[in-house]
Protein backbone atom coordinates (compact mmCIF):
# COMPACT_ATOMS: atom_id res chain seq x y z
CA UNK A 1 0.00 0.00 0.00
CA UNK A 2 1.11 3.58 -0.62
CA UNK A 3 0.90 5.98 2.33
CA UNK A 4 0.93 9.77 1.92
CA UNK A 5 2.32 11.58 4.96
CA UNK A 6 2.11 15.31 5.64
CA UNK A 7 3.28 15.70 9.25
CA UNK A 8 5.69 13.99 11.62
CA UNK A 9 5.68 10.82 9.48
CA UNK A 10 7.28 12.79 6.64
CA UNK A 11 10.50 12.33 8.56
CA UNK A 12 12.08 8.91 7.91
CA UNK A 13 13.23 8.66 11.52
CA UNK A 14 9.62 8.90 12.74
CA UNK A 15 8.31 6.51 10.09
CA UNK A 16 10.95 3.95 11.00
CA UNK A 17 10.34 4.38 14.73
CA UNK A 18 6.60 3.73 14.24
CA UNK A 19 6.80 0.87 11.72
CA UNK A 20 10.23 -0.59 12.43
CA UNK A 21 10.89 -0.47 8.68
CA UNK A 22 12.16 1.75 5.90
CA UNK A 23 10.20 2.24 2.66
CA UNK A 24 10.95 3.87 -0.67
CA UNK A 25 9.77 7.47 -0.49
CA UNK A 26 9.04 10.34 -2.86
CA UNK A 27 8.03 13.93 -2.40
CA UNK A 28 4.40 14.37 -3.39
CA UNK A 29 1.36 16.66 -3.21
CA UNK A 30 -2.32 16.17 -2.57
CA UNK A 31 -4.95 18.54 -3.89
CA UNK A 32 -8.05 19.73 -2.07
CA UNK A 33 -6.61 19.07 1.40
CA UNK A 34 -4.96 21.47 3.82
CA UNK A 35 -2.93 20.86 6.99
CA UNK A 36 -3.10 22.93 10.14
CA UNK A 37 -1.41 22.56 13.50
CA UNK A 38 -3.43 20.66 16.07
CA UNK A 39 -4.11 23.00 19.00
CA UNK A 40 -1.53 22.52 21.75
CA UNK A 41 0.51 19.99 19.77
CA UNK A 42 3.57 20.08 17.52
CA UNK A 43 1.96 17.99 14.76
CA UNK A 44 -0.74 18.75 12.17
CA UNK A 45 -4.05 17.41 11.00
CA UNK A 46 -5.23 17.19 7.40
CA UNK A 47 -8.72 18.27 6.37
CA UNK A 48 -10.52 18.75 3.05
CA UNK A 49 -10.41 22.24 1.50
CA UNK A 50 -11.25 22.79 -2.14
CA UNK A 51 -8.36 24.35 -4.07
CA UNK A 52 -5.72 23.68 -1.41
CA UNK A 53 -2.49 21.79 -2.09
CA UNK A 54 -0.49 20.05 0.64
CA UNK A 55 3.09 18.88 0.22
CA UNK A 56 4.27 15.69 1.83
CA UNK A 57 6.08 12.39 1.42
CA UNK A 58 4.66 9.31 -0.28
CA UNK A 59 5.90 5.97 1.04
CA UNK A 60 5.62 3.10 -1.46
CA UNK A 61 4.81 -0.53 -0.65
CA UNK A 62 3.96 -0.23 3.03
CA UNK A 63 3.12 -3.70 4.41
CA UNK A 64 -0.01 -4.65 6.38
CA UNK A 65 1.72 -4.88 9.78
CA UNK A 66 3.24 -1.43 9.30
CA UNK A 67 -0.16 0.00 8.31
CA UNK A 68 -1.64 -1.39 11.54
CA UNK A 69 1.14 0.32 13.49
CA UNK A 70 0.45 3.56 11.62
CA UNK A 71 -3.27 3.25 12.40
CA UNK A 72 -2.38 2.85 16.07
CA UNK A 73 0.04 5.78 15.95
CA UNK A 74 -2.55 8.09 14.39
CA UNK A 75 -5.18 7.11 16.95
CA UNK A 76 -8.88 7.80 17.24
CA UNK A 77 -8.87 11.37 15.89
CA UNK A 78 -7.79 10.37 12.39
CA UNK A 79 -9.26 8.08 9.74
CA UNK A 80 -7.28 6.43 6.98
CA UNK A 81 -8.66 7.64 3.65
CA UNK A 82 -7.80 6.79 0.04
CA UNK A 83 -6.81 9.81 -2.03
CA UNK A 84 -5.12 10.62 -5.35
CA UNK A 85 -1.52 11.79 -4.94
CA UNK A 86 0.76 13.56 -7.39
CA UNK A 87 4.40 12.59 -6.96
CA UNK A 88 6.78 15.41 -7.83
CA UNK A 89 8.32 13.18 -10.52
CA UNK A 90 5.01 13.57 -12.43
CA UNK A 91 3.46 10.22 -11.57
CA UNK A 92 -0.11 10.14 -10.22
CA UNK A 93 -0.84 7.39 -7.71
CA UNK A 94 -3.48 6.32 -5.23
CA UNK A 95 -2.50 6.33 -1.57
CA UNK A 96 -3.92 6.18 1.90
CA UNK A 97 -3.53 9.13 4.24
CA UNK A 98 -4.75 10.08 7.68
CA UNK A 99 -7.42 12.78 7.67
CA UNK A 100 -8.73 14.25 10.90
CA UNK A 101 -12.28 13.00 11.50
CA UNK A 102 -15.03 15.58 10.94
CA UNK A 103 -16.09 15.52 14.60
CA UNK A 104 -12.55 16.47 15.68
CA UNK A 105 -11.85 19.27 13.18
CA UNK A 106 -12.37 21.83 15.95
CA UNK A 107 -9.05 20.59 17.37
CA UNK A 108 -7.28 22.17 14.39
CA UNK A 109 -5.92 25.68 14.79
CA UNK A 110 -5.93 28.19 11.94
CA UNK A 111 -2.10 28.09 11.89
CA UNK A 112 -0.39 26.32 9.00
CA UNK A 113 2.04 23.56 9.98
CA UNK A 114 5.63 24.05 8.81
CA UNK A 115 7.78 20.91 8.42
CA UNK A 116 11.05 22.86 8.58
CA UNK A 117 10.02 24.49 11.84
CA UNK A 118 8.92 21.11 13.24
CA UNK A 119 12.28 19.58 12.32
CA UNK A 120 14.24 22.45 13.87
CA UNK A 121 12.14 23.04 16.99
CA UNK A 122 10.08 19.96 17.80
CA UNK A 123 11.32 16.73 16.19
CA UNK A 124 13.84 15.80 18.86
CA UNK A 125 11.33 16.29 21.71
CA UNK A 126 8.60 14.53 19.71
CA UNK A 127 10.83 11.49 19.23
CA UNK A 128 11.81 11.46 22.91
CA UNK A 129 8.27 11.83 24.23
CA UNK A 130 6.30 9.42 22.03
CA UNK A 131 5.79 6.18 23.97
CA UNK A 132 4.30 4.04 21.21
CA UNK A 133 7.49 3.49 19.24
CA UNK A 134 8.37 0.36 21.21
CA UNK A 135 5.13 -1.55 20.58
CA UNK A 136 5.78 -5.24 20.18
CA UNK A 137 2.23 -6.61 20.20
CA UNK A 138 1.55 -6.04 16.49
Image (spheres, helix red, strand yellow):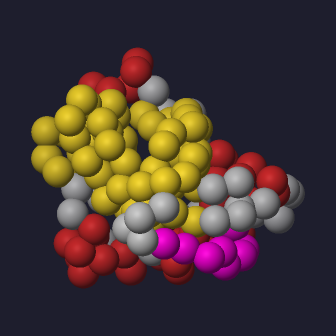
| Of the pair 132 and 88, the residue shown nearer to us | 88
Q: Is residue 128 left or right of residue 135?
A: left
Along the line of sight, the residue nearer the viewer: 83 or 18: 83
Residue most toward the top?
Answer: 103
Res 133 seen here: no
> Which percent across, then down, holds residue 69?
71, 55
Q: Is residue 47 above or below residue 97?
A: above
Q: Is residue 112 magenta?
A: no
Quarter of the image where one finds residue 135 = bottom right
Q: Which residue does the image show at 40% across and 18% down from the upper left?
A: 103
Q: Nearer the viewer, residue 57 or 129?
A: 57
Q: Main secondary structure of the magenta part?
A: loop
The x and y percentages for residue 11 are 45, 74
In the picture shown, does residue 63 fall above or below 54?
Answer: below
- Looking at the image, residue 43 sits to the left or right of residue 60; the answer is left
Q: Residue at x 22, y 41 (%)?
A: 52
Q: Position of residue 23 (x, y in %)?
A: 65, 74
Q: Pick out the residue farthest to the front.
A: 90
Residue 62 placement, left or right of 57: right
Write the start and end of the magenta stretch as one range: 19-26
Question: Quadrant location of the C terminus?
Answer: bottom right
Amino acid sequence: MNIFTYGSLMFPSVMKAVTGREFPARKANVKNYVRFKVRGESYPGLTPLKGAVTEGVLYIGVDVVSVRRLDDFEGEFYERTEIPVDALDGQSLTAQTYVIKAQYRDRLSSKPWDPERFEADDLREFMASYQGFDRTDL
